[in-house]
Amino acid sequence: MTLLSLRGIRKSFGAVDVLHGVDLSVAAGEVVGLVGDNGAGKSTLMKTITGIYRADSGSIEFDGKDILALDPGQRRQLGIEMIYQDLSLAKQQDVASNIFLGREPTKRLLGLFPGFVDKGEMDRQAAKMIERLGAHLPSINRSVGSFSGGQQQTVAIARALTFNPKLVIMDEPTAALAVREVQSVLDLIRRLKSEGIAVILISHRLNDVLSVTDRIVVLRHGRADADLVTARTNMNEVVSRIVGGGDIAAAAAHEQRG
Amino acid sequence: MASEQPGFWARVQRASVERLHIRLESLVVLLALSTAMALLSPYFLSLSNFLNILLATSTIGVLAIAATFVIGSGGLDLSLGSVMGLAGVAGAFVAVNLGWPSVLAVIACILAGAIAGYINGQLVTRAFVPAFIVTLGMLGLARGLALVISQGRAIYGLPAEIVYIGQGRPFGIPMPVIIFVLTAIVAHAVLAYTRFGRHTLALGDSEGAARAAGIRVEHHRRIIYTLSGALAGLAGLLFTARVNAGDPTAGINYELTAITAAIIGGTNLFGGRASILGTMIGALIMGVLQNGLTLLAVQSYYQQMAIGAVLILAVFIDQYQVRKESRV
Protein backbone atom coordinates (compact mmCIF):
# COMPACT_ATOMS: atom_id res chain seq x y z
CA MET A 1 0.00 0.00 0.00
CA THR A 2 1.46 3.32 -1.04
CA LEU A 3 1.86 5.69 1.90
CA LEU A 4 3.62 8.60 0.27
CA SER A 5 3.52 9.45 -3.41
CA LEU A 6 5.29 12.40 -5.05
CA ARG A 7 4.71 13.13 -8.73
CA GLY A 8 6.51 15.71 -10.83
CA ILE A 9 7.75 17.79 -7.91
CA ARG A 10 9.47 20.96 -9.06
CA LYS A 11 11.12 23.55 -6.88
CA SER A 12 13.32 26.49 -7.72
CA PHE A 13 14.80 29.27 -5.65
CA GLY A 14 14.86 32.35 -7.83
CA ALA A 15 16.82 31.43 -10.93
CA VAL A 16 18.19 28.23 -9.43
CA ASP A 17 16.20 25.11 -10.31
CA VAL A 18 16.80 22.52 -7.61
CA LEU A 19 14.14 19.89 -8.32
CA HIS A 20 13.08 19.22 -11.91
CA GLY A 21 10.11 16.93 -11.54
CA VAL A 22 10.83 14.27 -8.93
CA ASP A 23 8.74 11.11 -8.66
CA LEU A 24 9.02 9.13 -5.45
CA SER A 25 6.81 6.67 -3.65
CA VAL A 26 7.12 5.01 -0.27
CA ALA A 27 4.97 2.13 0.92
CA ALA A 28 3.81 1.71 4.51
CA GLY A 29 6.53 0.10 6.61
CA GLU A 30 9.08 0.43 3.84
CA VAL A 31 12.61 1.71 4.35
CA VAL A 32 13.76 3.80 1.41
CA GLY A 33 17.31 5.11 1.09
CA LEU A 34 17.71 8.49 -0.57
CA VAL A 35 21.21 9.00 -1.89
CA GLY A 36 22.86 11.49 -4.18
CA ASP A 37 25.82 13.79 -4.43
CA ASN A 38 26.00 17.07 -2.52
CA GLY A 39 23.65 19.53 -4.18
CA ALA A 40 21.52 16.84 -5.80
CA GLY A 41 18.47 18.20 -3.99
CA LYS A 42 18.01 15.68 -1.15
CA SER A 43 17.42 18.24 1.59
CA THR A 44 15.14 20.36 -0.58
CA LEU A 45 13.08 17.30 -1.48
CA MET A 46 12.70 16.31 2.18
CA LYS A 47 11.64 19.83 3.11
CA THR A 48 8.94 19.77 0.45
CA ILE A 49 7.67 16.57 2.08
CA THR A 50 7.63 18.00 5.62
CA GLY A 51 6.11 21.21 4.33
CA ILE A 52 8.90 23.64 5.17
CA TYR A 53 9.11 24.36 1.43
CA ARG A 54 6.10 24.51 -0.85
CA ALA A 55 6.65 22.70 -4.16
CA ASP A 56 6.24 24.97 -7.21
CA SER A 57 4.35 22.26 -9.06
CA GLY A 58 3.59 18.56 -8.83
CA SER A 59 1.49 16.59 -6.37
CA ILE A 60 2.12 15.09 -2.94
CA GLU A 61 -0.22 12.49 -1.57
CA PHE A 62 0.12 11.04 1.89
CA ASP A 63 -2.12 8.27 3.15
CA GLY A 64 -4.44 8.91 0.22
CA LYS A 65 -4.81 12.63 0.90
CA ASP A 66 -3.43 15.54 -1.11
CA ILE A 67 -1.19 17.39 1.36
CA LEU A 68 0.37 19.96 -0.96
CA ALA A 69 -1.48 22.85 0.68
CA LEU A 70 -0.83 21.80 4.29
CA ASP A 71 1.71 23.50 6.58
CA PRO A 72 4.40 21.60 8.55
CA GLY A 73 2.29 21.38 11.70
CA GLN A 74 -0.67 19.84 9.86
CA ARG A 75 1.59 17.37 8.04
CA ARG A 76 3.14 16.33 11.34
CA GLN A 77 -0.36 15.66 12.69
CA LEU A 78 -1.00 13.40 9.72
CA GLY A 79 2.11 11.44 10.69
CA ILE A 80 5.15 12.87 8.90
CA GLU A 81 8.08 13.28 11.25
CA MET A 82 11.63 14.41 10.46
CA ILE A 83 14.78 13.92 12.54
CA TYR A 84 17.42 16.43 11.56
CA GLN A 85 21.12 15.75 11.58
CA ASP A 86 21.70 18.03 14.58
CA LEU A 87 18.85 16.12 16.34
CA SER A 88 17.45 19.38 17.82
CA LEU A 89 18.06 18.16 21.36
CA ALA A 90 18.40 20.37 24.44
CA LYS A 91 21.67 18.87 25.61
CA GLN A 92 21.59 19.97 29.24
CA GLN A 93 18.08 18.62 29.87
CA ASP A 94 17.29 15.01 30.69
CA VAL A 95 15.69 12.33 28.52
CA ALA A 96 12.07 12.92 29.47
CA SER A 97 12.39 16.70 29.14
CA ASN A 98 13.60 16.28 25.58
CA ILE A 99 11.03 13.72 24.58
CA PHE A 100 8.16 15.82 25.91
CA LEU A 101 9.55 19.30 25.24
CA GLY A 102 6.66 21.59 24.41
CA ARG A 103 4.04 18.95 25.29
CA GLU A 104 4.75 18.22 28.95
CA PRO A 105 1.94 16.48 30.84
CA THR A 106 0.76 18.68 33.70
CA LYS A 107 -0.99 18.26 37.01
CA ARG A 108 -2.22 20.51 39.78
CA LEU A 109 0.19 21.15 42.64
CA LEU A 110 -1.53 20.17 45.92
CA GLY A 111 -4.71 20.01 43.85
CA LEU A 112 -4.69 23.79 43.60
CA PHE A 113 -2.18 25.34 41.24
CA PRO A 114 -2.46 24.21 37.62
CA GLY A 115 0.35 24.09 35.09
CA PHE A 116 2.86 22.04 37.06
CA VAL A 117 4.79 19.48 35.08
CA ASP A 118 4.05 15.87 36.01
CA LYS A 119 7.66 14.73 36.07
CA GLY A 120 6.89 11.25 37.37
CA GLU A 121 4.45 10.57 34.55
CA MET A 122 6.94 12.02 32.05
CA ASP A 123 9.75 9.77 33.29
CA ARG A 124 7.52 6.68 33.22
CA GLN A 125 6.39 7.31 29.66
CA ALA A 126 9.90 8.19 28.53
CA ALA A 127 11.25 4.94 29.98
CA LYS A 128 8.50 3.08 28.15
CA MET A 129 9.40 4.71 24.83
CA ILE A 130 13.07 3.83 25.23
CA GLU A 131 12.14 0.27 26.11
CA ARG A 132 9.86 0.02 23.08
CA LEU A 133 12.88 0.87 20.94
CA GLY A 134 14.80 -1.95 22.59
CA ALA A 135 17.50 0.55 23.52
CA HIS A 136 19.52 1.04 26.67
CA LEU A 137 20.43 4.37 28.21
CA PRO A 138 22.70 4.81 31.25
CA SER A 139 20.03 6.75 33.14
CA ILE A 140 16.84 8.48 32.17
CA ASN A 141 17.63 11.35 34.55
CA ARG A 142 20.96 12.31 33.05
CA SER A 143 21.42 15.24 30.71
CA VAL A 144 21.24 14.12 27.09
CA GLY A 145 24.56 15.82 26.32
CA SER A 146 26.39 13.27 28.47
CA PHE A 147 25.21 10.45 26.17
CA SER A 148 27.01 9.06 23.14
CA GLY A 149 25.90 10.02 19.64
CA GLY A 150 23.94 6.81 19.19
CA GLN A 151 22.17 7.22 22.51
CA GLN A 152 21.24 10.76 21.52
CA GLN A 153 19.79 9.37 18.29
CA THR A 154 17.71 7.02 20.43
CA VAL A 155 16.27 9.97 22.35
CA ALA A 156 15.52 11.85 19.12
CA ILE A 157 13.78 8.80 17.65
CA ALA A 158 11.83 8.21 20.87
CA ARG A 159 10.62 11.80 20.70
CA ALA A 160 9.57 11.35 17.08
CA LEU A 161 7.59 8.22 18.07
CA THR A 162 5.48 10.13 20.59
CA PHE A 163 3.78 11.80 17.62
CA ASN A 164 2.70 8.36 16.32
CA PRO A 165 4.28 8.91 12.92
CA LYS A 166 3.58 6.83 9.85
CA LEU A 167 6.69 8.14 8.11
CA VAL A 168 9.99 9.12 9.70
CA ILE A 169 12.57 10.97 7.64
CA MET A 170 16.11 10.69 8.99
CA ASP A 171 18.87 12.99 7.78
CA GLU A 172 22.34 11.41 8.05
CA PRO A 173 21.63 9.58 11.33
CA THR A 174 24.89 7.61 11.22
CA ALA A 175 27.22 10.30 9.91
CA ALA A 176 28.93 11.14 13.17
CA LEU A 177 28.80 7.80 14.96
CA ALA A 178 31.32 5.20 16.03
CA VAL A 179 31.12 1.83 14.27
CA ARG A 180 29.35 0.01 17.10
CA GLU A 181 26.86 2.85 17.45
CA VAL A 182 25.99 2.71 13.76
CA GLN A 183 24.71 -0.84 14.23
CA SER A 184 22.44 0.16 17.08
CA VAL A 185 20.94 3.02 15.05
CA LEU A 186 20.39 0.67 12.10
CA ASP A 187 18.67 -1.69 14.54
CA LEU A 188 16.41 1.18 15.59
CA ILE A 189 15.47 1.73 11.95
CA ARG A 190 14.63 -1.99 11.59
CA ARG A 191 12.55 -1.69 14.76
CA LEU A 192 10.56 1.18 13.24
CA LYS A 193 9.97 -0.90 10.12
CA SER A 194 8.77 -3.85 12.20
CA GLU A 195 6.18 -1.54 13.78
CA GLY A 196 4.90 -0.63 10.34
CA ILE A 197 6.52 2.80 10.25
CA ALA A 198 8.00 3.86 6.93
CA VAL A 199 11.47 5.42 6.95
CA ILE A 200 13.24 7.61 4.43
CA LEU A 201 16.95 7.41 5.15
CA ILE A 202 19.18 10.13 3.75
CA SER A 203 22.79 9.06 3.99
CA HIS A 204 26.19 9.29 2.40
CA ARG A 205 27.22 6.03 4.04
CA LEU A 206 26.23 3.60 1.32
CA ASN A 207 27.12 0.55 3.40
CA ASP A 208 24.48 1.56 5.93
CA VAL A 209 21.95 2.28 3.19
CA LEU A 210 22.56 -1.08 1.54
CA SER A 211 22.25 -2.97 4.80
CA VAL A 212 18.99 -1.50 6.11
CA THR A 213 16.82 -0.34 3.19
CA ASP A 214 14.28 -2.08 0.95
CA ARG A 215 14.78 0.31 -1.94
CA ILE A 216 17.33 2.96 -2.89
CA VAL A 217 16.38 6.08 -4.80
CA VAL A 218 19.23 7.99 -6.41
CA LEU A 219 18.72 11.71 -6.80
CA ARG A 220 20.83 13.34 -9.47
CA HIS A 221 20.58 16.89 -10.84
CA GLY A 222 17.16 17.33 -9.26
CA ARG A 223 15.62 14.13 -10.65
CA ALA A 224 15.01 10.67 -9.24
CA ASP A 225 17.54 9.14 -11.57
CA ALA A 226 17.28 5.55 -10.39
CA ASP A 227 14.96 3.47 -8.23
CA LEU A 228 16.77 0.31 -7.18
CA VAL A 229 15.60 -2.67 -5.16
CA THR A 230 18.26 -3.10 -2.50
CA ALA A 231 18.25 -6.89 -2.68
CA ARG A 232 19.05 -6.79 -6.40
CA THR A 233 21.70 -4.09 -6.51
CA ASN A 234 25.18 -3.55 -5.17
CA MET A 235 27.65 -0.86 -4.22
CA ASN A 236 29.03 -0.50 -7.75
CA GLU A 237 25.66 0.14 -9.30
CA VAL A 238 24.61 2.66 -6.64
CA VAL A 239 27.88 4.57 -6.93
CA SER A 240 27.73 4.64 -10.73
CA ARG A 241 24.18 5.98 -10.58
CA ILE A 242 25.24 8.69 -8.10
CA VAL A 243 28.24 9.94 -10.07
CA GLY A 244 26.61 9.20 -13.43
CA GLY A 245 29.48 7.57 -15.25
CA GLY A 246 33.13 8.60 -15.12
CA ASP A 247 35.63 6.63 -13.15
CA ILE A 248 33.14 4.37 -11.45
CA ALA A 249 35.57 1.67 -10.42
CA ALA A 250 37.73 4.10 -8.48
CA ALA A 251 34.75 5.75 -6.79
CA ALA A 252 33.26 2.40 -5.84
CA ALA A 253 36.55 1.14 -4.50
CA HIS A 254 36.80 4.28 -2.40
CA GLU A 255 33.32 3.72 -0.97
CA GLN A 256 34.09 0.09 -0.27
CA ARG A 257 37.04 1.12 1.85
CA GLY A 258 35.19 3.83 3.67
CA MET B 1 37.44 9.40 37.95
CA ALA B 2 36.22 7.81 34.74
CA SER B 3 35.52 4.41 36.29
CA GLU B 4 32.25 2.59 35.56
CA GLN B 5 30.77 3.16 39.02
CA PRO B 6 30.79 6.81 40.04
CA GLY B 7 32.19 7.42 43.51
CA PHE B 8 30.12 8.29 46.55
CA TRP B 9 30.83 12.01 46.27
CA ALA B 10 29.92 12.04 42.57
CA ARG B 11 26.63 10.28 43.30
CA VAL B 12 25.74 12.70 46.10
CA GLN B 13 26.62 15.58 43.77
CA ARG B 14 24.40 14.22 41.01
CA ALA B 15 21.52 13.53 43.37
CA SER B 16 21.67 17.04 44.80
CA VAL B 17 21.57 18.54 41.31
CA GLU B 18 18.76 16.26 40.11
CA ARG B 19 16.54 16.35 43.18
CA LEU B 20 17.28 19.65 44.91
CA HIS B 21 18.53 21.63 41.92
CA ILE B 22 21.59 22.85 43.81
CA ARG B 23 25.24 22.36 43.25
CA LEU B 24 26.81 20.86 46.35
CA GLU B 25 30.00 22.87 45.92
CA SER B 26 28.18 26.15 46.48
CA LEU B 27 26.71 24.85 49.73
CA VAL B 28 30.17 23.78 50.87
CA VAL B 29 31.56 27.21 50.03
CA LEU B 30 28.74 28.89 51.97
CA LEU B 31 29.37 26.73 55.05
CA ALA B 32 33.14 27.17 54.85
CA LEU B 33 32.81 30.92 54.44
CA SER B 34 30.38 31.15 57.37
CA THR B 35 32.67 29.06 59.58
CA ALA B 36 35.64 31.23 58.69
CA MET B 37 33.69 34.42 59.46
CA ALA B 38 32.43 32.96 62.75
CA LEU B 39 36.00 32.15 63.80
CA LEU B 40 37.29 35.57 62.76
CA SER B 41 34.54 37.69 64.24
CA PRO B 42 32.71 37.19 67.56
CA TYR B 43 29.74 39.17 66.22
CA PHE B 44 29.08 36.96 63.21
CA LEU B 45 27.16 34.14 64.93
CA SER B 46 24.08 35.85 66.29
CA LEU B 47 20.43 35.92 65.34
CA SER B 48 20.46 39.67 64.80
CA ASN B 49 23.46 39.43 62.51
CA PHE B 50 21.83 36.53 60.66
CA LEU B 51 18.77 38.70 60.04
CA ASN B 52 21.11 41.52 59.03
CA ILE B 53 22.66 39.31 56.38
CA LEU B 54 19.24 38.28 55.08
CA LEU B 55 18.08 41.90 55.05
CA ALA B 56 21.17 43.01 53.15
CA THR B 57 20.72 40.07 50.78
CA SER B 58 17.03 40.67 50.06
CA THR B 59 17.47 43.37 47.42
CA ILE B 60 20.38 41.62 45.70
CA GLY B 61 18.53 38.32 46.05
CA VAL B 62 15.48 39.55 44.13
CA LEU B 63 17.76 40.89 41.40
CA ALA B 64 19.61 37.56 41.37
CA ILE B 65 16.29 35.75 40.77
CA ALA B 66 15.76 37.98 37.73
CA ALA B 67 19.31 37.29 36.55
CA THR B 68 18.73 33.54 36.93
CA PHE B 69 15.69 33.54 34.64
CA VAL B 70 17.33 35.71 31.99
CA ILE B 71 20.70 33.93 31.96
CA GLY B 72 19.02 30.53 32.17
CA SER B 73 17.11 31.41 28.99
CA GLY B 74 20.35 32.21 27.23
CA GLY B 75 20.00 35.99 27.64
CA LEU B 76 21.65 38.65 29.73
CA ASP B 77 20.33 41.65 31.65
CA LEU B 78 22.93 44.24 32.57
CA SER B 79 20.30 46.88 33.31
CA LEU B 80 19.08 45.29 36.58
CA GLY B 81 20.74 47.80 38.92
CA SER B 82 19.75 50.86 36.88
CA VAL B 83 16.16 49.69 36.41
CA MET B 84 16.00 49.08 40.16
CA GLY B 85 17.13 52.69 40.72
CA LEU B 86 14.60 54.00 38.20
CA ALA B 87 11.77 51.99 39.76
CA GLY B 88 12.53 53.30 43.25
CA VAL B 89 12.53 56.90 42.01
CA ALA B 90 9.30 56.32 40.05
CA GLY B 91 7.59 54.98 43.17
CA ALA B 92 8.86 57.82 45.36
CA PHE B 93 7.83 60.39 42.73
CA VAL B 94 4.30 59.00 42.59
CA ALA B 95 3.99 58.88 46.39
CA VAL B 96 5.71 62.18 47.30
CA ASN B 97 5.63 64.57 44.34
CA LEU B 98 2.22 63.50 43.03
CA GLY B 99 0.89 62.59 46.47
CA TRP B 100 -0.98 59.57 45.17
CA PRO B 101 -1.93 56.63 47.43
CA SER B 102 0.81 54.21 48.47
CA VAL B 103 -0.75 51.35 46.54
CA LEU B 104 -0.23 53.27 43.32
CA ALA B 105 3.38 53.99 44.32
CA VAL B 106 3.99 50.28 44.79
CA ILE B 107 2.41 49.56 41.41
CA ALA B 108 4.50 52.35 39.86
CA CYS B 109 7.73 50.71 41.08
CA ILE B 110 6.94 47.34 39.58
CA LEU B 111 5.35 48.76 36.44
CA ALA B 112 8.35 51.02 35.74
CA GLY B 113 10.61 47.99 35.98
CA ALA B 114 8.33 45.85 33.83
CA ILE B 115 8.15 48.52 31.11
CA ALA B 116 11.94 48.82 31.01
CA GLY B 117 12.19 45.02 30.79
CA TYR B 118 9.50 44.89 28.11
CA ILE B 119 11.48 47.38 26.01
CA ASN B 120 14.59 45.23 26.49
CA GLY B 121 12.66 42.18 25.31
CA GLN B 122 11.20 43.92 22.27
CA LEU B 123 14.61 45.17 21.17
CA VAL B 124 16.29 41.81 21.71
CA THR B 125 13.66 39.81 19.80
CA ARG B 126 12.52 42.23 17.09
CA ALA B 127 15.45 44.56 16.38
CA PHE B 128 18.03 41.76 16.55
CA VAL B 129 20.36 43.83 18.71
CA PRO B 130 22.35 41.53 21.03
CA ALA B 131 21.05 41.37 24.60
CA PHE B 132 24.43 42.52 25.86
CA ILE B 133 24.12 45.82 23.95
CA VAL B 134 20.38 46.35 24.51
CA THR B 135 20.62 45.97 28.28
CA LEU B 136 23.89 47.92 28.43
CA GLY B 137 22.06 50.73 26.67
CA MET B 138 19.14 50.36 29.09
CA LEU B 139 21.64 50.57 31.96
CA GLY B 140 22.45 54.11 30.79
CA LEU B 141 18.90 55.03 29.78
CA ALA B 142 17.23 53.96 33.02
CA ARG B 143 19.88 55.59 35.21
CA GLY B 144 19.63 58.81 33.24
CA LEU B 145 15.83 58.82 33.43
CA ALA B 146 15.97 58.23 37.19
CA LEU B 147 18.22 61.30 37.53
CA VAL B 148 15.93 63.36 35.27
CA ILE B 149 12.77 62.46 37.22
CA SER B 150 14.38 63.16 40.58
CA GLN B 151 16.36 66.13 39.26
CA GLY B 152 19.46 64.45 40.58
CA ARG B 153 18.36 64.47 44.20
CA ALA B 154 16.95 61.79 46.45
CA ILE B 155 13.20 62.06 47.04
CA TYR B 156 12.44 62.03 50.78
CA GLY B 157 9.26 61.87 52.84
CA LEU B 158 7.72 58.56 51.85
CA PRO B 159 4.36 57.62 53.43
CA ALA B 160 4.40 55.29 56.43
CA GLU B 161 2.86 52.35 54.54
CA ILE B 162 5.76 52.25 52.12
CA VAL B 163 8.36 52.67 54.84
CA TYR B 164 6.74 49.67 56.56
CA ILE B 165 7.54 47.53 53.52
CA GLY B 166 11.20 48.30 54.11
CA GLN B 167 11.45 48.66 57.86
CA GLY B 168 8.50 46.78 59.33
CA ARG B 169 9.24 43.67 61.37
CA PRO B 170 6.22 41.41 61.79
CA PHE B 171 7.19 38.58 64.21
CA GLY B 172 10.61 40.19 64.41
CA ILE B 173 11.40 39.35 60.79
CA PRO B 174 12.20 42.27 58.49
CA MET B 175 9.55 42.76 55.79
CA PRO B 176 12.07 42.75 52.90
CA VAL B 177 13.26 39.33 54.06
CA ILE B 178 9.70 37.98 54.06
CA ILE B 179 8.98 39.39 50.59
CA PHE B 180 12.32 38.11 49.30
CA VAL B 181 11.79 34.58 50.63
CA LEU B 182 8.22 34.39 49.27
CA THR B 183 9.39 35.63 45.88
CA ALA B 184 12.16 33.03 45.88
CA ILE B 185 9.75 30.19 46.70
CA VAL B 186 7.37 31.15 43.90
CA ALA B 187 10.24 31.67 41.47
CA HIS B 188 11.74 28.31 42.34
CA ALA B 189 8.44 26.53 41.77
CA VAL B 190 7.97 28.30 38.44
CA LEU B 191 11.48 27.62 37.15
CA ALA B 192 11.82 24.03 38.33
CA TYR B 193 8.32 22.61 38.04
CA THR B 194 6.21 24.46 35.47
CA ARG B 195 6.14 24.24 31.70
CA PHE B 196 7.13 27.90 31.56
CA GLY B 197 10.28 27.20 33.57
CA ARG B 198 11.21 24.10 31.60
CA HIS B 199 10.75 25.93 28.32
CA THR B 200 12.92 28.75 29.67
CA LEU B 201 15.82 26.36 30.26
CA ALA B 202 15.26 24.47 27.01
CA LEU B 203 15.37 27.80 25.20
CA GLY B 204 18.67 28.68 26.84
CA ASP B 205 19.97 25.22 26.08
CA SER B 206 19.14 25.10 22.39
CA GLU B 207 16.99 27.69 20.68
CA GLY B 208 16.70 25.37 17.68
CA ALA B 209 15.37 22.51 19.80
CA ALA B 210 12.88 24.82 21.52
CA ARG B 211 11.67 26.14 18.18
CA ALA B 212 11.39 22.62 16.74
CA ALA B 213 9.28 21.66 19.77
CA GLY B 214 6.80 24.40 18.95
CA ILE B 215 7.78 26.83 21.71
CA ARG B 216 7.19 30.44 20.70
CA VAL B 217 10.77 31.47 21.23
CA GLU B 218 10.54 35.25 20.72
CA HIS B 219 7.33 35.54 22.72
CA HIS B 220 8.92 33.58 25.56
CA ARG B 221 12.00 35.81 25.56
CA ARG B 222 9.87 38.95 25.78
CA ILE B 223 8.07 37.53 28.81
CA ILE B 224 11.40 36.69 30.47
CA TYR B 225 12.82 40.19 30.00
CA THR B 226 9.59 41.78 31.20
CA LEU B 227 9.64 39.52 34.25
CA SER B 228 13.26 40.46 34.88
CA GLY B 229 12.37 44.16 34.75
CA ALA B 230 9.39 43.66 37.08
CA LEU B 231 11.62 41.88 39.61
CA ALA B 232 14.13 44.74 39.38
CA GLY B 233 11.16 47.01 40.11
CA LEU B 234 10.35 44.95 43.20
CA ALA B 235 13.97 45.21 44.31
CA GLY B 236 13.74 48.98 43.81
CA LEU B 237 10.65 49.08 46.00
CA LEU B 238 12.36 47.11 48.78
CA PHE B 239 15.45 49.31 48.68
CA THR B 240 13.56 52.60 48.53
CA ALA B 241 11.30 51.57 51.39
CA ARG B 242 14.24 50.42 53.51
CA VAL B 243 16.31 53.60 53.14
CA ASN B 244 13.13 55.73 53.16
CA ALA B 245 14.14 57.66 50.04
CA GLY B 246 13.86 57.46 46.28
CA ASP B 247 17.56 57.56 45.52
CA PRO B 248 18.42 57.93 41.80
CA THR B 249 21.86 56.42 42.41
CA ALA B 250 20.45 53.30 44.10
CA GLY B 251 21.56 49.97 42.68
CA ILE B 252 24.76 51.08 40.95
CA ASN B 253 26.83 47.95 40.26
CA TYR B 254 24.12 45.73 41.75
CA GLU B 255 23.85 43.81 38.48
CA LEU B 256 27.45 42.73 39.08
CA THR B 257 26.57 41.18 42.45
CA ALA B 258 23.27 39.73 41.19
CA ILE B 259 24.82 38.04 38.17
CA THR B 260 27.67 36.77 40.37
CA ALA B 261 25.16 35.24 42.80
CA ALA B 262 23.36 33.48 39.95
CA ILE B 263 26.58 32.10 38.48
CA ILE B 264 27.91 30.93 41.86
CA GLY B 265 24.58 29.18 42.35
CA GLY B 266 25.20 27.03 39.30
CA THR B 267 23.49 28.99 36.52
CA ASN B 268 25.23 28.28 33.22
CA LEU B 269 26.46 31.61 31.85
CA PHE B 270 25.33 30.50 28.37
CA GLY B 271 21.90 29.28 29.46
CA GLY B 272 20.18 25.92 29.80
CA ARG B 273 20.94 25.23 33.43
CA ALA B 274 19.70 27.30 36.38
CA SER B 275 17.95 26.96 39.69
CA ILE B 276 16.56 29.49 42.11
CA LEU B 277 17.63 27.45 45.16
CA GLY B 278 21.18 27.51 43.84
CA THR B 279 20.96 31.24 43.22
CA MET B 280 19.74 31.77 46.78
CA ILE B 281 22.85 30.03 48.07
CA GLY B 282 24.90 32.20 45.74
CA ALA B 283 23.18 35.33 47.04
CA LEU B 284 23.81 34.22 50.63
CA ILE B 285 27.49 33.66 49.83
CA MET B 286 27.68 37.24 48.55
CA GLY B 287 25.76 38.45 51.61
CA VAL B 288 28.00 36.59 54.07
CA LEU B 289 31.09 37.79 52.25
CA GLN B 290 30.02 41.43 52.42
CA ASN B 291 28.76 41.14 55.99
CA GLY B 292 31.90 39.39 57.17
CA LEU B 293 34.23 41.85 55.50
CA THR B 294 32.28 44.69 57.08
CA LEU B 295 32.48 43.08 60.54
CA LEU B 296 36.21 42.66 59.99
CA ALA B 297 36.33 46.38 59.18
CA VAL B 298 37.58 45.85 55.64
CA GLN B 299 37.08 48.94 53.50
CA SER B 300 34.12 48.73 51.12
CA TYR B 301 36.45 49.39 48.19
CA TYR B 302 38.06 46.03 48.85
CA GLN B 303 34.62 44.40 49.05
CA GLN B 304 33.90 45.63 45.53
CA MET B 305 37.14 44.03 44.39
CA ALA B 306 36.26 40.80 46.16
CA ILE B 307 32.91 40.58 44.34
CA GLY B 308 34.54 41.11 40.95
CA ALA B 309 37.15 38.46 41.69
CA VAL B 310 34.51 35.98 42.89
CA LEU B 311 32.52 36.44 39.65
CA ILE B 312 35.52 35.60 37.48
CA LEU B 313 36.49 32.71 39.73
CA ALA B 314 32.96 31.26 39.68
CA VAL B 315 32.74 31.34 35.89
CA PHE B 316 36.21 29.82 35.66
CA ILE B 317 35.28 26.91 37.93
CA ASP B 318 31.99 26.38 36.10
CA GLN B 319 33.62 26.31 32.68
CA TYR B 320 36.39 24.08 33.99
CA GLN B 321 33.79 21.55 35.14
CA VAL B 322 31.87 21.73 31.88
CA ARG B 323 35.07 20.99 29.97
CA LYS B 324 35.89 18.13 32.31
CA GLU B 325 32.43 16.58 31.93
CA SER B 326 32.44 16.85 28.16
CA ARG B 327 35.73 14.97 28.07
CA VAL B 328 34.31 11.96 29.97
Image (cartoon, coloured by chain):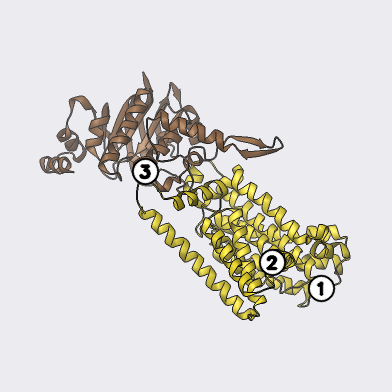
Chain colours: A brown, B yellow
- Residue A74 vertical position relative to residue B285 in the rendered view, above or below: above
Quadrant containing the C terminus of chain A is top left
**Front residue of this view, candidates B190 and A250:** B190
To which chain does the residue with label 2 belong? B
Chain ID, mark 1: B
Give the CA distance from mark 1 to mark 3: 59 Å
- Residue A103, image x, y percentages: 55, 36
Find numbered disc 1 in the image and state the secondary structure of the residue it sits on.
strand
Crowd band around label 3 with a 10 angstrom C-alpha radius: few (<14), some (14–19), many (20+): some
Dots 3 and 2 on the same chain: no
Residues under numbered marks 3 and 2 in contact, where contact means CB atoms less than 8 Å apart: no
Alpha carbons under labels 1 and 2: distance apart = 26 Å
Give the number of the mark in front: 3 or 2. Answer: 2
Q: Is residue B311 above or below residue A206?
A: below
- Can you tell which quarter of the image residue B101 is in? bottom right
Task: Give the camera-side residue of B316 and B249.
Answer: B316
Front position in the image: A12 or B286: B286
Q: Are marks 1 and 2 in contact (CB under 8 Å)?
A: no
Label 3 near label 1: C-beta < 8 Å?
A: no
User: Amino acid type of disc 1?
Assistant: Ile
Residue behind mark 1: B155
Disc 3 to disc 2, how far (Cα)? 51 Å
Look at the image and tell me in which quarter the N terminus of chain A lies. Answer: top left
Q: Position of residue A165 (x, y in %)?
A: 44, 28
Residue on which disc 3 sits: A85
Q: Disc 2 marks which amino acid?
A: Ile
**Circle 3: residue type:** Gln
Residue at figure coordinates x 69%, y 37% from the top left: A110
Residue under numbered circle 2: B53
Q: Secondary structure at mark 2?
A: helix
Mark 1 and mark 2 lie on one chain; the one further toward the N terminus is: 2
**Residue B290 horizontal/vertical position (percent):** 64, 72
